[in-house]
Image: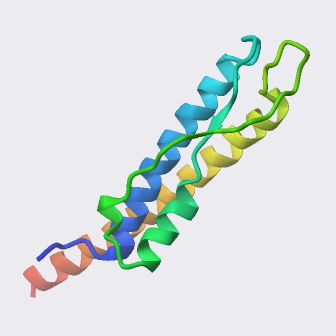
Amino acid sequence: MSLLDNTQLALESAMSGSMLRQSVLANDLANANTPNFRPEDVNFQQTLAGAMASGQSPTSVTFTPFTENVVNSADGNGVNSDAVNAQIAANGLLYQDLTEIAAKREGILTTAMNATTSA
């Protein structure tokens, strides 16, 4: 039996997906001046929600980047630097929220375990 429930496992999986998305978005930004570069993204929230709705374990979810078929400049590059910077900021805040929630839940579990051992 695992001490971690599905909610905690989903939080950890979402943190993993958010880290992957941050890496993908940073790569997009790094290639903002590369001719014919197509940006990628990761929709980890929808992927995780769909997996959990179908009864799949959060630990078995695989997040896969997808290529966006857009062109934003004459050289064929599809990166919109302003939009990517905003996505990086939003994703960073989401990751921070996820880690805070996961830490608080682990703290509750630790407190509960200590309360039962000291009684």
Front residue of this view, candidates 104 and 53:
53
> Which residue is at a point 34% across and 72% down the rendered structure image?
56
Residue 93 left/right relative to 34: left
> Which residue is at a point 35% across and 66% down the rendered structure image?
58
Q: Measured from the top left, where is residue 114 in percent x and y?
A: 16, 75
Q: Measured from the top left, where is residue 97 in percent x and y?
A: 56, 58
Q: How is the image coloured?
A: rainbow
Q: Is residue 93 visible?
A: yes
The C terminus: image quadrant: bottom left
Q: Measured from the top left, where is residue 84 in percent x and y?
A: 75, 34
Q: Return the residue found at the far right.
A: 74
| Relative vertical location of residue 19 with respect to residue 62 in this rendering, above or below | above
| Relative vertical location of residue 11 with respect to residue 2 in this rendering, above or below | above
Q: How many marks?
A: 0
Front residue of this view, candidates 53 and 98:
53
Q: Measured from the top left, where is residue 59 in percent x and y?
A: 30, 61
The N terminus: image quadrant: bottom left
> Which residue is at a point 80% across and 34% down the rendered structure image?
70
> Which residue is at a point 68% across and 30% down the rendered structure image?
39
**Picture quadrant where residue 111 is located:** bottom left
Residue 69 left/right relative to 30: right
| Relative vertical location of residue 97 with respect to residue 117 in this rendering, above or below | above
Residue 19 left/right relative to 116: right
